[in-house]
Image (spheres, rainbow, N blue to C red):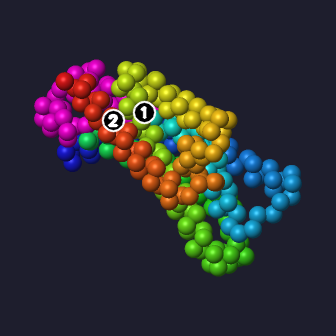
């Protein structure tokens, strides 16, 4: 199982679509910084504290970044099981490792690849902003005085982003199987994400936990509950993918 998982991870991480998705998320994060950049230049608003931190945090929690995340994390590995079934390779892998090991490897790899893409893109934003907005002495002093808050906000955002990336990556595998189409596996998570956000904001304003944007960037929700929701949703989607794929492998 370990060897199969390593093979699947290499297959996803060395895929050109992984680089494309990571670059896409970084670009989305840069576009998401436009609001804070405009406030500084046109409204004359001064940013207190670490400027690079505020820019990176704004970019990685912006609506453009969050709504494109389900699309980009789906690119490298969404059709992994579907393609194996279509090509017949699944029969070879299953005969050697068994259904459980095969599917566990695919689902785990898809989660880790999506999580890694989300994490790497976020770190790229922080590193890039650090280079552009190198901290002044006053900003360093502010960090030393409030490092607990900075670390909590940064680690919470990174953790929720990683879980979101993994969750939507596995969901793309499920949709690719159900719809039997690689491109729908790419686009369907993005469409569903947009629909969930729009419906919640328009028709179910009080049911804020139904908004997937809150799972990644809590504005009105408790981040601890968001972590729990993401873990539960990821488990349910993974289980559903496993059960459906097991039937397809018969």
- Tag of residue 172: 1
The span picked out in magenta is 75-103
Q: Residue at x 53, y 31 (%)?
A: 192
Where does label 2 land, which residue? 240
Q: Where is residue 126 shown, x and y percent of the image? A: 59, 58
Q: x, y percentage for residue 209?
A: 55, 47
Q: Return the residue nearer the eye: 89 or 176.
A: 176
Can I make out residue 11 in this image? Answer: no
In this view, the residue farthest toward the right is 43
Q: Residue at x 75, y 53 (%)?
A: 36
SS assignment for the magenta stretch, majority = helix
Q: Nearer the viewer, mark 1 or mark 2?
A: 2
Q: At which x and y percent is residue 69?
A: 54, 40
Closest to the observer, 89 or 105: 105
- The quarter of the image holding the N terminus is top left
Q: Quadrant of the C terminus?
A: top left
Confirm whether the magenta stretch covers residue 77. yes
In the rendered image, residue 82 lying in the magenta stretch gets the answer yes
Name the residue nearer the viewer: 213 or 157: 213
Q: Could you tell me which secondary element the residue under label 2 belongs to?
A: helix
Q: Would you identify the image quadrant in which residue 197 lies? A: top right
Sequence-first disc among 1 and 2 = 1
- Kindly report the distance in space between the C-alpha atoms of the residues bearing marks 1 and 2: 12 Å
Left or right placement of residue 149 versus residue 95 in this view: right
Q: Height in image: 42 above or below 52?
A: above
The residue tagged with tag 1: helix, strand or loop?
helix
**In the image, what residue occupies the spot 62% across and 39% down?**
204
- Whether residue 86 appears in this view of the structure is yes
* Position above or below: 91 against 141: above
Q: Is residue 36 above or below residue 144?
A: above
């Amino acid at each position: 199982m370990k060897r199969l998982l390593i093979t699947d991870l290499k297959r996803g991480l060395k895929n050109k679509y992984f680089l494309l998705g990571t670059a896409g998320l970084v670009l989305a994060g840069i576009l998401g910084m436009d609001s804070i950049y405009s406030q500084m230049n046109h409204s004359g608003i001064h940013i207190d504290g670490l400027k690079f931190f505020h820019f990176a945090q704004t970019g990685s929690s912006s609506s453009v970044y969050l709504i494109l995340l389900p699309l980009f994390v789906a690119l490298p590995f969404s059709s992994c099981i579907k393609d194996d079934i279509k090509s017949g390779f699944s029969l070879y892998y299953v005969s050697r490792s068994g259904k459980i090991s095969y599917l566990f490897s695919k689902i785990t790899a898809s989660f880790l690849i999506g999580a890694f893409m989300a994490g790497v893109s976020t770190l790229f934003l922080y590193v890039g902003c650090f280079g552009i907005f190198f901290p002044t002495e006053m900003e360093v002093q502010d960090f030393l005085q409030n490092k607990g808050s900075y670390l909590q906000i940064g680690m919470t955002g990174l953790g929720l982003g990683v879980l979101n990336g993994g969750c939507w990556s596995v969901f793309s595998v499920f949709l690719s199987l159900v719809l039997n189409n690689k491109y729908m596996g790419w686009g369907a998570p993005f469409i569903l994400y947009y629909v969930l956000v729009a419906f919640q904001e328009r028709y179910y304003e009080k049911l804020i936990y139904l908004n997937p944007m809150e799972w990644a960037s809590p504005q009105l929700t408790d981040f601890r509950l968001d972590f729990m929701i993401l873990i539960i949703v990821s488990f349910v989607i993974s289980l559903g993918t496993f059960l459906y794929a097991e039937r397809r492998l018969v």
